[in-house]
Image (tube, coloured by chain):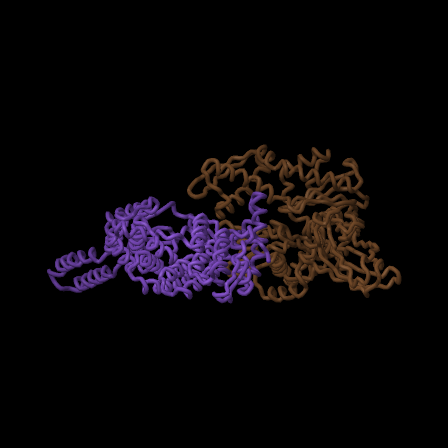
Amino acid sequence: MSSTNFYKELELDPTLPDQELDRSLKDVHRKWQTRINAPSLERRQEAERMIQLIEAAKPVLLDPSKRKQYDASMLVPQTVAGQSPVESSVTYEVLSEGTAPIAQQETNYRTAYQADEQDEEDEPLTPIEALLEQAEEYIDNERYYEAIKKVNEAIAIDSSDDNIYSVLAWALHGTGQTANAILEMERAIELNPYFSGYYYNMALLYNEHPILNDEECLRSGQKWLSEALRRDPEDFSYRYHLAYLHRRNDKYGEALSILEDIYRNWTDEQAEDCDFGFIDLKNEMALIHYKLGQKYAKYNKKANVDYYIRKEDVDQAFYHQIQALKYVVDSEQRSKIDLAIRYIEKSKQRVFFGSRFSSNIKIPIFLIVFSIIAQPNFNNVGYFGAAILILSAILNYIPRWKYDQIHYKEPCKKHRNCRCSC
Amino acid sequence: MIIGIDLGTTFSAVAYVDKDGIPAIIPNREGERTSPSVILFEQSVPVVGSRAKDEALNDPLNVVQFVKRQIGNTSYSFLNEAGETYSPEELSAIILKRLKQDAEDHLGFPIHHAVITVPAYFDDVQRKATKDAGKIAGLNVVKILNEPTAAALAYGISQQSEDQDVMVFDLGGGTFDVTIMSISNQEIIIKATGGDRNLGGFDFDNKIIEYVHNQFLQTHQIDLYDDPIALQQLREMAEECKKSLSIYPESSFMLSSQGKTLRVALTRDMFVEMIRPLLNRTSIVMRNVLQDSGMEWADLEKILLVGGSTRIPAIREWIQEASGIVPSDELHPDEVVALGAAIQADLLNEKQSRMMLRPAVVDVNSHSLGIISLDPQHREQNSIILPRNTPIPAKKSDVFITMDDRQDNVSIVVTEGEDEDPNYVRVIGQSTIQLDRPPKGYEIRVTLSYDADGIVHINAQDERTGKDMGEFMIDRKSNLSEPAIVDKTKRFTDLTIN
């Protein structure tokens, strides 16, 4: 099989489903086919290379079965599915150097013996625990292959220890073999179905699954997380993750109520066991408020501007952005919020012309004018004038959309086919 | 009626020989004598010509330009917004079809046959691809003619009967040819030819574009190469600027991108300095061709200028400096190739030819033809069978010996190029000759030939018995297959081009 990583070279998202991948591959093609006439020789050569790469990628990535094969060869060179947990003499071999492990952000995963450790602190570690501890150290340092070696040693001692498989799963996940990691985690659950941490681990694995699309990740993650919460409903980490999933599903209200509850009950003691810090919590709450606020703004993609239609929207958005500002710690996020607030304040100063309020004022004025004209004698002219005035008053009742355009940046050079990044 | 088509990188033209035997350009539906070789896709409907070129400014991603640079490149295909892909052959076919329609509208009867010109330096793959493009456009391509030869035909019929040795210097929108020939009104004999596949007006424009790009980067820190619309505007402006520098000593224009504006002022001297590396390339080609022809500069009577880029004064001065000959601009640089193609078309139409004079044309191959063989150390090498500048049609045979006992086939890989190393020549294709499992050392005589269009054929013969084994299909990996051509021709039958 070819050793080129098409996803990386063509900047494609490997988790896209087949149809969307087809579309993004076409976009990449359209981008480079024009560049083949670039003015500088290097750029022309680069474009030619990319076009060749695209042509090579098409038959592989656009055929679902071939793509599956290719994905497997890129991410999971050794498939071990189908082996029973008991006779597992699994040896994962180190991936070829050409395949870059999918670097994950540091994840705090759970092992059953972590909980045990506190109880039996003074007792010496068993050989397996010692090996696993070393393996975990390697994982923390992103030395996944050495971790896998240690785990294999532990399996040689006792292949029925559920902890081993959980650690192995994390090491595999680190190398990018998430599909295998999930199998191993399932094995751990099979051996010890009462420990809620494994279910949570499963949710985390699905959260960072490199192959599945967002929707599938979220659905599977939620499934496993609800299993974990069923066993341990008060755990902050589980609930925090649930809030995160809610946010990803655009259920901001639910996410916010969970986070507010955690925020209220926060103690430093509990913080020790948490996978997230107080700062993370605050940032997450700020993010949700920010997103809630942004929901009221209408975004005009063509002109790259945000605008508000109603005065109430401005007020709501303002409330949420102020809340966000209250919580936010992250400086990048803060600057975004600041920007949003600046624009809202600008909008607040603006009179909303098209609103019903202004046309309501006009009605009595029309009536007065009409009565002045009509009073002396009711002739046809009077009726005619009245009809026109009433009509115009009615027309005023129809709400008109008038919005304030706020330019976030330099407006993009407008054109229907402009695909430049603005 | 057979028409002559000059299918250019930037502009194309059609011509025919009228009832008085005089070649004439056929204007397009806009009334222009040449049509820009630019295609715009309005969804899936192609638009060719000036309108497409104008629209390139607004809609650069849906416009195809410089297709000729991609002809023979299998990895290139154009994907339009409707999701349809077009190979370079099909894109060329769209242009050809539009030219055909224009000719039909003007002449008032359907056209089925055409002579299409290609740069002399085009190789077999590119010639075959051009021929295929004609087929897809619904034309029977009666001949693929070299552009300098076409120009010589148009020039030759107006000359006396004495032979004169001339050099045709053809620098167009994207390709460059130098051909030395002996011309009279009786015959045109090509002595030597050479060129550069990718050298032309496009590259001169690029030099200006690169200059402006650097200026823009320095003053505004904006990379124009990432702004397709500004880049397309710049391409137009650079072209205009280049053209006006051929008339005036200086030219300037304004360009804006992302709200920033830059005024660019160029003098002719600056421009000459920019294109000096390209001018150097033209001298190298000229010198090599002169050497191949076995002549000296003093033997040449004339240097004829063909192609729009020869309007650049610096190029004329450059030629004069190199050769000591004042190049002649008596030919119309944009139209003469199409006119020559029309003359060739008329000459081929023997029964109804209207030409008074019927000069004979002897052309040559521009690349050496070879095959990949194994040397005694079993290493692959390219052995040249027909050296370049051999008059065509030409054939040459060589005896090959099988290297193993009971070998059941001999595979012949045909190449074009001058190098001994197979990595530095163009592989045209492969042909497999089936054998009857003879013992080691069996001798086969393989004949490679060029037809009059410069396209390669393979024949084989049993050396010992003299039995003819017939012609073998070359599996051309860089060209469309026959069924694909038939398929695409069908797809194009009902295609309307605006």
Residue B50 in sight from this viewpoint: no
Whether residue B102 sits left or right of residue B385 in the image: it is left
Residue A78, quarter of picture: bottom right
Q: Which of the chains is brown?
A: B
Seen from the viewer's position, the closer of residues B429 and A140 is A140
Residue B173 lies, with reference to residue B321, above or below; the image says: below
Residue B250 lies, with reference to residue A410, above or below; the image says: above
Q: Position of residue B465 (x, y in %)?
A: 88, 63
Residue B280, quarter of picture: top right
Please identify the quadrant where the N terminus of chain A is shown: bottom right
Q: In the figure, what tint was chain A given?
A: purple
Q: Say how many tags the image has.
A: 0
Whether residue A121 sits left or right of residue B289 in the image: it is left
Seen from the viewer's position, the closer of residues B213 and B301 is B213
Whether residue B293 sits left or right of residue A2 in the image: it is right
Q: Position of residue A112 (x, y in %)?
A: 38, 58
Please name the residue shown 58% across and 34% down the image.
B268
Q: Position of residue A109 (x, y in %)?
A: 39, 55
